[in-house]
Amino acid sequence: MNGDDTEDTTARASDFQPTDAERTGDSNDSDSEFDTKAVAEFQFDQVTRRGDERVARSVEWSFERSEASDGSGHLASDGGVERNDADEGTTTTGADDVASPSTEEFTPGPRRRSTTGDAGIGTQRGGASDATNERGGDVTGRAAGRVRATWRTRVGGPVGTPPVVRDRTVYAGTGDGNTVALDRRDGVSEWLFETPTAVGPTAVTGAVVYVGDRDGVLHALDASSGVELWRFETDAGVDVAPVPVGDDVYVASRDGRVSVLDAANGDRRRSFRTVARAVSSLTVADDAVYVTGLDGGLYAHEFDGTERFRFRPSLAVAAAPAVADGVAYVGTVDGDRVFAVDTATGDAYWEHRTGAGVWSSPVFAGDAVYATSTDGSAYALDARSGSVRWRVATDARIWGRPAVTDEAVYVANDDGLTFAFDRATGRTRWRFLAQDGVVAGPAVGRHAAYVGDVSGTVSAIPL
């Protein structure tokens, strides 16, 4: 453990609290007034804080996720970093495509090495924000400025999956079945596609948008018009992000079946059944298909469906692994850990304990792994050892995946705050308050970060 060479500092609770203007919406931002009464019908199983007031609500995705039979993987989406058209042909897609993998050789440490320790657990003391940074210095965000949205757009029901930004368009899905395409410059809606039930995470490649719904239908939509090109019906709900790879589209249904479809027409080329009893995510990387399940497993399959390994560390794995250089990085919900797993054997190189469950996919970038936890912290871990490089607590649970660029790590919490942390030091660069709680990670484009909240609002935050 690296506890001897790290430093703990504690920030004032007021450092991360919204201002009075932010709490009431009384600001100079002309787009700040919204009809938030529209979200009263949604159930949200969380407690959010607005000043001294604590409001308990319950959202469908959270309630269903608590049931062992539910396969919802709404936090495993590729929100991604905006890419050029030339990048769309990549054959490595899924949880690890928001950052380029390191070209350095990975040198594994001892098997099952634990990095658990006080310095690695995100505690909260009286609501103050704790920070750990092996480089020292203030990483508590005391100097961080608050930013305002460039635009905000109401898209319907709660946004429970990350937006996806590609070129000039931001795509968002909602809990009431809408998939919306917004112009990233002004938030004006370009098209709307409706389904009878909630939609899962969106995948976008080339000129096609893929989205599944809880009726078990995968829809392929024209990215420019929203017109349905084809549909594929499964025997169970499609709650996890489909994965386009070349001429194929991989889709996993809630019952554990993985189908490989022809991207041109949606015809099924082959399929296999994974051993996961309730599929929570799907990704394709390093010549393998990875599936996680709420039964606590990470399962790797060859492309023909042959099982490569089973890694079963806990009772629930909610999100896809990040895969790079022969290592899969995955978090567990009830085990409160991030693991580095050999993709050839399924053996663990190391594990790091967080203060609560890890509901989203880690992100591998350079020589570090970035993860979030419902302990309210964002973590930067050394990819070789799992030791903490920095940790910043945000005072509210983080359900969604971080977005990572060359300079910054972006996370959002269920108090509605989105943070930009310096990637090297963890220092807070800025923070933004959404209209309501945020349960999915942000997406980052060239000029803005985009975040959806449970009021059904998508906001563009200038970078």
Image: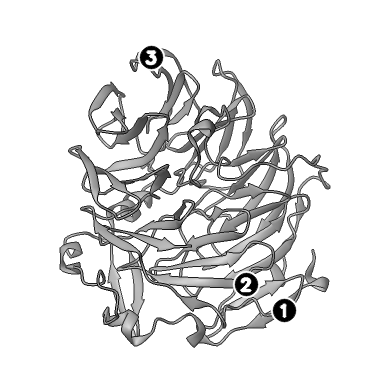
Q: Earlier in the sequence, mark 2 or mark 3?
A: 3
Mark 3, other Cα within 10 Å: few <14 / some 14–19 / many ≥20 = some
Q: In the rendered view, does 267 fall on the left or right side of 330?
A: left
- Above or below residue 36? Residue 301 is above
- Amino acid of disc 3: Arg
Q: Earlier in the sequence, mark 1 or mark 3?
A: 1
Query: Which residue bears the numbered disc 1?
Result: 137
Query: Which residue bears the numbered disc 3?
Result: 268
Image coordinates for residue 114, horizontal then vertical, percent: 75, 56
How far, Cα to Cα, is label 1 from label 3? 55 Å
Label 3 sits on a secondary structure element that is strand
The circle on residue 427 is 2
Q: In the rendered view, does 208 fall on the left or right side of 329?
A: left
Q: Quadrant of the N terminus?
A: bottom right
Q: Earlier in the sequence, mark 2 or mark 1?
A: 1
Image coordinates for residue 149, horizontal then vertical, percent: 36, 67
- Above or below residue 350? Residue 259 is above
The circle on residue 33 is none
Q: Residue at x 31, y 68 (%)?
A: 436
Image coordinates for residue 212, horizontal then vertical, percent: 32, 34
**Quarter residue 337 falls in:** bottom right
